[in-house]
Image (spheres, rainbow, N blue to C red):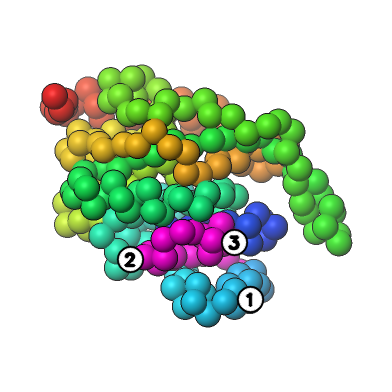
């Protein structure tokens, strides 16, 4: 599931390039155009059409109107055909092993949440850098600050898995109703991971499969939402944990 608002065409094409270069082709891509206007929608479809048909034929564009950050993901889950759901935002990069590692874990541990390592890199936006269009440049080298193995108790206090680091069974969302909480303006990935891990357990592998970009200069979820929204969302996630029985695997 690739959600986009059409605001970063320069990173969107890199996200697609990274998916086209996967060493495993057994996946589909749903580009979730969230409140994207007609010119940007046309641009997105034009970008997809520039890829080889072997990849472009596995990409579907889904128009999503209204709602917050979680809404496109729930719409995508309902549209998807695969057994597992993974999220790659339009400014992230999947390394060549991303799909293959997640798929291998899912085959060996069916029905469980599957998780791999993620690197992160800080970048900054450069207006007008590419023929008058916005570009970006790295401001730091890639690092691996997130633990390679999943520890549920450590995740209760702080999220330690970016959205691109895990995949959940689609049936958990479509059949059991455990989708992304649309009342949360942020932390929707952390909330889903905690619920899914408790219900399904987690199988992980100590390999890095994706690059998570963080914007030091430029619009991001950190700049789009005020501090009080982050604090309220965090409190909501913790409150939800307090109200429900929690299952800890052996």
Left or right of 236? Residue 127 is: right
- Please name whichever residue, 159 or 103, is drawn nearer the observer in this view of the structure: 103
Where is residue 49 drawn, in percent x and y?
59, 78
**Between marks 3 and 2, how big is the CA–CA gap?**
21 Å
Q: Quadrant of residue 244?
A: top left
* Quadrant of the frame with the N terminus: bottom left
Marks counted in the figure total: 3
Where is residue 224 drawn, in percent x and y?
59, 40
Q: Which circle marks residue 17 in the picture?
A: 3
Helix, strand or loop at mark 1: loop
Residue contact between numbered discs 3 and 2, judged by CB atoms under 8 Å: no
Q: Is residue 129 magenta?
A: no
**Between marks 3 and 1, how big is the CA–CA gap?**
11 Å
- Please name whichever residue, 199 or 66, is drawn nearer the observer in this view of the structure: 199
Helix, strand or loop at mark 3: helix
Identify the mark nearer the N-term, 3 or 1: 3
Residue interval drawn in magenta: 16-38
Q: Residue at x 70, y 57 (%)?
A: 10
**Of tags 3 and 2, which is closer to the observer?**
3
Q: Quadrant of residue 186?
A: top left
Left or right of 66? Residue 199 is: left
**Of tags 1 and 2, which is closer to the observer?**
1
- Judging by the rendered image, the residue that carries numbered circle 1 is 50
Q: Is residue 86 above or below residue 197?
A: below
- Judging by the rendered image, the residue that carries numbered circle 2 is 80
Left or right of 29? Residue 223 is: right
Judge the density around disc 1: few (<14), some (14-19), many (≥20) Cα neighbours within 10 Å. few
């Amino acid at each position: 599931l690739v959600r986009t608002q059409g605001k970063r065409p320069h990173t969107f094409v890199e996200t697609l390039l990274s998916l086209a270069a996967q060493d495993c082709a057994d996946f589909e891509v749903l580009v979730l155009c969230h409140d994207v206007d007609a010119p940007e929608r046309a641009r997105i479809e034009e970008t997809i059409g520039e890829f080889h048909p072997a990849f472009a034929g596995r990409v579907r564009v889904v128009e999503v109107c209204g709602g917050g950050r979680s809404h496109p993901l729930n719409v995508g889950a309902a549209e998807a055909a695969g057994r597992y759901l993974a999220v790659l935002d339009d400014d992230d990069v999947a390394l060549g092993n991303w799909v293959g590692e997640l798929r291998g874990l899912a085959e060996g541990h069916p029905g469980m949440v599957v998780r791999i390592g993620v690197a992160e890199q800080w970048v900054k936006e450069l207006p007008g850098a590419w023929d008058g269009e916005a570009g970006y440049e790295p401001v730091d080298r890639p690092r691996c600050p997130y633990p390679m193995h999943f520890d549920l108790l450590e995740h209760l206090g702080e999220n330690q898995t970016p959205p691109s680091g895990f995949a959940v069974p689609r049936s958990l969302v479509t059949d059991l109703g455990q989708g992304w909480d649309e009342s949360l303006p942020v932390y929707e990935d952390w909330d889903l991971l905690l619920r899914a891990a408790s219900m399904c357990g987690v199988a992980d592998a100590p390999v890095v499969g994706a690059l998570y970009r963080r914007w030091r200069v430029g619009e991001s979820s950190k700049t789009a939402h005020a501090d009080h929204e982050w604090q309220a969302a965090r409190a909501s996630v913790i409150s939800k944990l307090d109200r429900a029985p929690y299952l800890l695997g052996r």
